[in-house]
Image (spheres, helix red, strand yellow):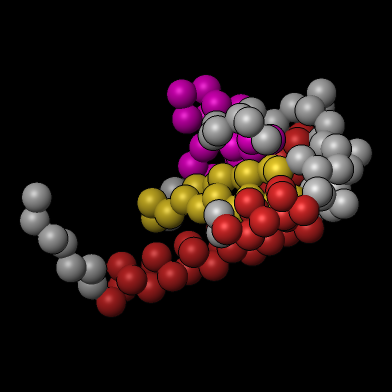
Amino acid sequence: MAIVCKSTAEIERMRSSGRIVREVLDHVRALVTPGATTMDLERAAEKKIKDLGAKPAFKGYYDYPCVLCTSVNEEIVHGIPSEKRVLKAGDIVSSTAAWFSMDITAMRPSPCRSTIRSNRKFASCSR
């Protein structure tokens, strides 16, 4: 497989997409609190994405219903947000997002406030 060098324009598109990912995931991370649902995070992410003028890659892809993949604790990846999934103190939440403008995905582990010490350490090490 050959190494493909990106043009200046492609690098700028990647940089711009990365900023959007960061803004959305930072916004979502701030909402990870006990009592919030993963669907609350989904709605906030979708609104932020719309406000930024971006188009999410996940929603509608093979009928996937959401803009985020949100997993809690032992769920590894690709959790589907739900009203039934209520966050508790100590939960580790990971949210993944991607955009059509460029293949950039990012995952941010977010400890739920009042998280036990070992979970905070895990989230810190996995950034």
State which quadrant residue 53 falls in: bottom right
Please state the extent of the stretch shown in magenta in the rendering. 55-72
Q: Is residue 50 visible?
A: no
Residue 33 can be seen, yes or no: yes
At a point 39% along the width and 67% down the height, the residue shown is 13
| Dominant secondary-structure state across the stretch colored magenta | loop
Residue at (54% x, 67% y) in the render: 19
Direction right: furthest residue: 35
Question: 25 or 75, which is in the foreground?
Answer: 75
Q: Is residue 51 left or right of residue 2?
A: right
Judge by depth and name the residue closer to the eye, 108 or 103: 108
Seen in the picture, residue 60 relative to 25 is either above or below; the reply is above
Is 82 above or below relative to 57?
Answer: above
| Residue occupying image coordinates x 72% and y 50% | 118
Which residue is outermost to the left? 2
Q: Is residue 115 above or below residue 4?
A: above
In the image as oriented, which residue stretches furthest toward the bottom?
8
- 45 or 37: nearer the viewer: 37
Q: Is residue 31 left or right of residue 69?
A: right
Q: The C terminus is located in which quarter?
A: bottom right
Whether 60 is among the magenta residues is yes
Q: How many marks?
A: 0
Residue 10 image offset from top left, x and y in percent: 31, 67
Residue 104 appears in which quarter of the rendering? bottom left
Residue 43: x, y in percent?
Answer: 76, 42
Would residue 81 appear left or right of 108 to someone viewing this image?
A: right
Residue nearest the observer in this picture, 24 or 122: 122
Residue 106: x and y in percent read 51, 53
Name the residue: 64% across, 53% down. Answer: 123
Q: Is residue 77 magenta?
A: no
